[in-house]
Image (cartoon, helix red, strand yellow):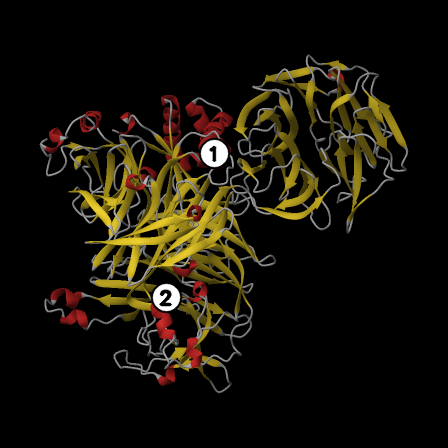
Amino acid sequence: MATTSSMFMYSLTVQPPTAITQAILGQFAGTKEQQIVTASGSRLTLHRPDPSQGKIITALSHDVFGIIRAIAAFRLAGSNKDYIIITSDSGRITIVEFVPAQNKFNRLHLETFGKSGVRRVIPGQYLAVDPKGRACLTASVEKNKLVYVLNRNSQAELTISSPLEAHKAQTLVFALVALDVGYANPVFAALEVDYGESDQDPTGQAYEEIEKTLVYYELTLEAFRVAIPRRRGATEDPQRKRSIIAGVMHKLKGAAGAFFFLLQTEDGDLFKTTIEMVEDDNGQPTGEVKRLKIKYFDTVPVSSSLCILKSGFLFVASEFGNHQFYQFEKLGDDDEEIEFISDNFPTDPAEPYTPVYFHPRSAENLSLVESIDSMNPLMDCKVANLTEEDAPQIYSICGTGARSTFRTLRHGLEVSEIVESELPGVPSAVWTTKLTRNDTFDAYIILSFSNGTLVLSIGETVEEVTDTGFLSSASTLAVQQLGEDGLIQVHPKGIRHIRADRRVNEWAAPQHRSIVAATTNERQVAVALSSGEIVYFEMDSDGSLAEYDEKKEMSGTVTCLSLGEVPEGRVRSQFLAVGCDDSTVRILSLDPDSTLENKSVQALTSAPSALSIMAMADSSSGGSTLYLHIGLYSGVYLRTVLDEVTGELSDTRTRFLGPKPAKLFRVSVQGQTAVLALSSRPWLGYSDPVTKGFMLTPLNYPGLEWGWNFSSEQCTEGMVGIQGQNLRIFSIEKLTDNLLQESISLTYTPRRFVRHPEHPYFYTIESDNNVLSPATKTKLLEDPSVVNGDATVLPPEEFGYPRGKGHWASCISIIDPITEKSVLQKVDLEDNEAAVSIATVSFASQEDEVFLVVGTGKDMVVSPRSSTAGFLHVYRFHEDGKEIEFIHKTKVEEPPMALLGFQGRLLAGVGKDLRIYDLGMRQLLRKSQAEVVPNLIVGLQTQGSRIVVSDVQESVVMVVYKFQENKLIPFVDDTIARWTSCTTMVDYETVAGGDKFGNLWLLRCPAKASEEADEEGSGAHLVHERQYLQGAPHRLALMAHFYPQDIPMSIQKTNLVVGGRDCLLWAGLQGTLGILIPFVGREDVDFFQTLEQHMRSEDAPLAGRDHLIYRSYYVPVKGVIDGDLCERYTLLPTDKKQMIAGELDRSVREIERKISDIRTRSAY
């Protein structure tokens, strides 16, 4: 079925999910350093905390193509390396080790124990490991538990036993933990509920009396209780109980048996909990517990995992929003906080107790060192080009409560600027140079102007120097440190060779000719004359420059030259690349036997403006390869492989940089050689630190005219560039993130947002349930009975908003992401109303003036869904959309979940009804109405008079509006009940969408049905057409289906790169950004389909899930090729690569080029 699909898409992840479901600590590299391993969706990521910089660096991210349910670290006794145990939806337990030398995860064991999928009775939901690494226990939510014994064999390899069963019917497990019992038999403890009695009891009495029990698989103990402190404050509900949602235990160094817990409540408050032991006669603690103590520590964001590092840091994997990395300032032992002890509370859980309270305060024990960007939960996303750049930006709303943000994403690398200074004139070029070969840092910055040259010395300050031997009266073409201690300056009339003792040798250009292009390295110089001749020099044994006796005539004017660096252990670079204005590049040999002989030639689409030969890391060969980088006058960049023996050029990859001619410079970034390419904006070509693949990414920086490497004591790896009349020195810190984020804080959880049709402003609707609205909050604080200490208002972004059951807090914000980069105006909603939908509508009756319409619900209950009323608020724009003014509101039966402008009127989905409204003086006037879906309208799209209506659980329906009859007629619907979360129209007949189970799909309306719907006339033929199975007369056909494993929240047709093809960009709830690229030709489809099949068998998913079944979770995958799997080809070992290449009848380089091309042509 799938192979005959007439439509094929290529699915790629642009940004992997950022929501962390679990984080674990361990020494996975086998060194003293601790690393953090996180699971997000189907990705396993290894982070390396750098305590000296207070940063977290991502070392490796691996897609396991399966849902990771739980991860745990364990170490065999006597070993110094931690292994990772993964339980996933594959029904198998996987043991993985991290191999630092190859920077990859290696699978050691894969044991099948149950069915695949995330099921109630299949173990894998909970995972606990004995602290001495002897056994692990995995449990399902209900009934089943399995114990695996871990050991090593005579070859010191890790072994795993058959599972031991510890099943217990009619039992629900809530949590599982392993106890530290030294070398006694391993003990595990679980929190369980036995529902056997309540299952049999029809009265419900047994259910009321149910108790959670702590079950030790071996032991019994007496219990101690201490109440969880509640927040004190005027806006707090004193009756609200707190529960513990996360925690971590840490053993202290030195003191025997000293340890503490940090426990977190749902407000984010951390409590330090310690256990006091009974002491023996010598004052040493015994194992017997005397009392529990708890006290307030600090408040951090609500987390899914907490990790305490030995280096004194706390990693908080936030449930929502950015993850935080804190440093411990102190352990909270000597502060004023009240400590509550278990002596004051009854041990019987049924007995009542007096609640205890504390005052939250700003952090004292922890200080934030780094906040790691996370877009989870991502609620909505739009692509627009508001800054008039060559590529559009992605705008999104994400986060919850007061930590929610509006984010602008653009493709680029973060640049940190070090110096910007204005120059006396406009320079044309800049160089830096060392004085001798063994210097570590540069000594001079040389600037070339149209009529002269300026030399600056680099020291504590940068100042002009005049006695350097450089010719200052002419402009400069090249500067080079030559040999041991010489300097070279090439100017239009000749070459100056400056010796260490300031003697100057001058080579003058022949009469009536000048030098138009030059290239140098530490032993060779080549220059091109205006007559089209090339003169070549090499350094003699005495350090002087010797001219090669013949000049080489070229067919056209030479535009650029390049000599590579001299390879290690050689005396010269083998090749000279020459670019001519007849749109060719020639490679000339510099071998003494065949000097300046033609080796190869390559034709180009336009004249070359820059050349650069350099060696870079190469993923296909695994080593380093010599490349020729070419920049053209048309703004195109090419990278081609230069054969080190024959000088042949092969495997050319191209990329359009911008409309200006491209210039290329060799720079060094993070210890690797990179190429700086300048067109209308600066780009950097480098090897990706994780995959080693070649990346070309724009820099988030103004356009530069010239650039060069820069190295000084203050900035060892930097670059110097010219922008207009300014000299800028900057460096690039991070090569791992190529999507830059700018955040603007919002007030409550954002739900939807729209853009102003003409101006660069966005309007968000935000609402939070069970949160007090500002009016209620003010009323409580102004209450005269409030004690002074309770009236302090804490910043909500750290402490959250005061809670109140049944209350809604909601507002509309106007955001300017371009100039102000802030919220311009905030309109709060009154009377417990919460905004649910928003649209900008131009009303034809008001001379096409654009209004903002917001749909709200009053006293909404989320589940089961109910509300007392719905409203449609209308706002008028002022000052080009910077302000909005309320006009009127119209009451409707229930909250309108979807709004859209349609033919100069408003289209609203109210419950099951689709309505058309027009704008009246006092309220909106209903013009037309039809019941088109079975449950609830949640989304609307339109083209022409066709409307695509999404139902909450019954997929999409296409409706046609007949203007003469004023009728809305549904004419085609779907065969499958899809829980629609987002849709977009790809063309007039095709809809792409996503659903709540994490699927993406494309549906197409049959051509006949589409034509019938648009026929002229009354639409009577549609109304009277026979219904098919209680639905519309026709059905939509499924074109493509794919399971990306994140819930799509928004999808749209757009292009992301300059000159790129249209693709579908979707955004997932956990912060994923992905694209679907349509294939144009059948040939590419066959190639990638075959590659995908080979990858499935050669690179089977790490956690043991079958890739095809994983991508077909709910519906068999159709018409979509998994690009993330194809891209893993570059990471395979060389022998496997060559085997697959042989099967495909292509070269390894060709396959890698195709894989990288399909990404760079449409995305990042």
Rendered residue at 25%/51% (across/down): 923
Q: Position of residue 481 (x, y in %)?
A: 78, 35
| Element type at mark 1 | loop
- 1057 relative to 187, above or below: above
Quadrant of the image occupied by residue 295: bottom left
In the image, 1106 versus 615, the foreground residue is 615
Q: Position of residue 1050 (x, y in %)?
A: 35, 43
In the image, 350 versus 190, the foreground residue is 350
Q: CA distance from mark 2 to mark 1?
A: 43 Å
Tell me the amino acid under the disc marked 1. Val
Category of crowding for the residue at label 2, using alpha-carbon neighbours closer than 10 angstroms: few (below 14), some (14–19), many (at least 20):
some
Category of crowding for the residue at label 1, using alpha-carbon neighbours closer than 10 angstroms: few (below 14), some (14–19), many (at least 20):
many
Residue 122 visible in the picture: no
How many marks can you see? 2
- Quadrant holding the N terminus: top left
Give the labeled residue for mark 1.
1057
| Element type at mark 2 | helix
Residue 234 visible in the picture: yes
Rendered residue at 35%/74% (across/down): 780
Give the labeled residue for mark 2.
774
Q: Is residue 5 left or right of residue 318?
A: left
